[in-house]
Each structure stands twice: as C-alpha cells, then as structure tokens.
Amino acid sequence: MEVLAIIGAIIVIIYTYSLTRKASKEGKKGLELLQNFESKMNSQGFAKRIVVYDFLSERAKKSVGKMFMHWWTVGLWLDYPKQLIAFRLNRDTWEEITVPFNKIQSVEVLEDGYAITAGGAIGYGGFAVGGAKTNEISKGLQIRIVTGDIQTGTKAYFVNLYDPKYGAKLNKADPNYRSIQECARSIADEINNIIRHTMSQ
C-alpha cells in the first residue's frame, strides 16, 4: 500500500510540474505577444486604451502577474487625431480591428448573453452596486459594437471582456467582476461619446 501511495504522489508531482511548466511557457509567450501588440498600437498613434487589466485592483494585478496580463488586456485603443478606434476582441486575438469614428453605429453591453445597455440610452441595470446576488455566477460579459454605413451595410464585433470558459467562474458580487463591469461601462461611455460628437459634426 505504501508503495502505491508513493507512486501516486510522484505521479501527482510530475503532473503538477508539467502543468506549471506549460503555464509558465504560455505566460512568457503571452507577455511577449502583448509587448509587441502594445508597441504596435503606440507606434500607430493609439495613445489611449480602455482594457480590463487597468480596472483590476492592485491585489488582483499582483495575482495575475505580468505573465498573464495578456488575458486581461482586452478592450479598445483610441487615436483621437486620426479619429480611429481599434479593438482587441479576446485574449487569443492579436490582430486588432480598426474602425473610423464615423463608421461606429451603436454599442451595447451584453451580460449573460442579454443586452443591458444600448445606443445612446445608458441604463446599467445589472451593473447597479449591490444589485447582484452573491451566488449569481456570470456567464460572460461582452461589448457589441455595430459599424458600417449605407454603402457597406453593418457589421457587429464582440469584445469579450470576460469569458468563463477561460479559468475560474466569477460571482457577480466579486470585486474582480465589478472591475470588469466598470471597464464595460467606460467602453460604452467612450463609444457613445464618439457617436454623439461624430453625429454633430
């Protein structure tokens, strides 16, 4: 029995070591890709960004560490002089979608697959502080941005700020989830501001 227990412990150690090594390798690659992406955005003139990572608490940032920043650096980048907006759609995407301000038609926040903000009417519904039950698990949080014009028709893009298939599930009352919600609010505010000012020009 002791021999079997020792063999079992060795297998667990080897498996854990293998997973840790794989995660470390993925983290290093992700950090390198993120640095390259940020460098590219800066060189193209995208001076402002709104991404989940910047809304996390200092404690959460320490927990994420530099190796896994790329998972949470999803959102949008802005170039005001050229009037361009760029999106990084999810944690696995490194090719940005760039759209002129005047092509943005609408924005809405989707929580659990349902719209809770739309167009210029911002009603944050489920984002109300204290509004979520502590045992309510998020099924995802996305920003849906519709672009286009009368010549091209419309196209919708989905920016996945939180996808529970990647890692731990979050309660809606969790401070980290609240940080993601605040990022979503800020993106909706920014895009609605762009739409309003573009329409008035």
Image (cartoon, rainbow, N blue to C red):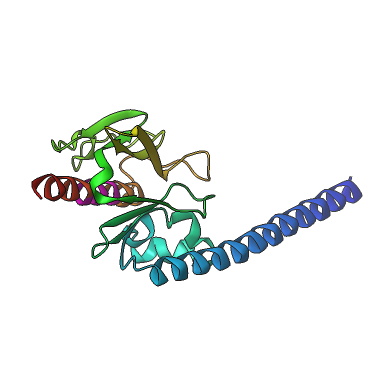
Residue 183 among magenta residues: yes
Query: Would residue 185 be found to the left or right of residue 37 on screen?
Result: left
Q: Residue furthest top?
A: 114
- Identify whether 81 is placed above or below 115: below
Question: How far across and down, in percent of the image, does residue 133 sit?
Answer: 28, 34
Q: Quadrant of residue 32?
A: bottom right
- Residue at 20% of width from left, 40% of height from top? 130
What kind of secondary structure does the magenta stretch mostly adopt?
Answer: helix
Query: Relative to the observer, which residue lies in front, 177 or 143?
Result: 143
Query: Relative to the observer, which residue lies in front, 156 or 49?
Result: 156
| Quadrant where the image shows the N terminus | top right
Please say whether residue 38 is visible from this viewpoint.
Answer: yes
- Residue at 44% of width from left, 47% of height from top? 89
- Residue at 52% of width from left, 55% of height from top? 94
Residue 103 among magenta residues: no
- Give the magenta-colored segment's residue range: 182-190
- Identify whether 156 is placed above or below 78: above
Question: How far across and down, in percent of the image, does residue 170 sit?
Answer: 41, 42
Number of disc labels: 0
Question: How far across and down, in percent of the image, does residue 166 sit?
Answer: 53, 44
Q: Residue furthest front?
A: 151
Query: Would residue 98 be found to the left or right of residue 48 on screen?
Result: right
Q: Residue furthest left?
A: 200
Query: Would residue 2 be found to the left or right of residue 19 on screen?
Result: right
Question: How far across and down, in percent of the image, does residue 74 sit?
Answer: 41, 53
Query: Relative to the observer, which residue lies in front, 43 or 182?
Result: 43
Please say whether residue 182 is visible from this viewpoint.
Answer: no
- Residue at 25% of width from left, 50% of height from top? 101
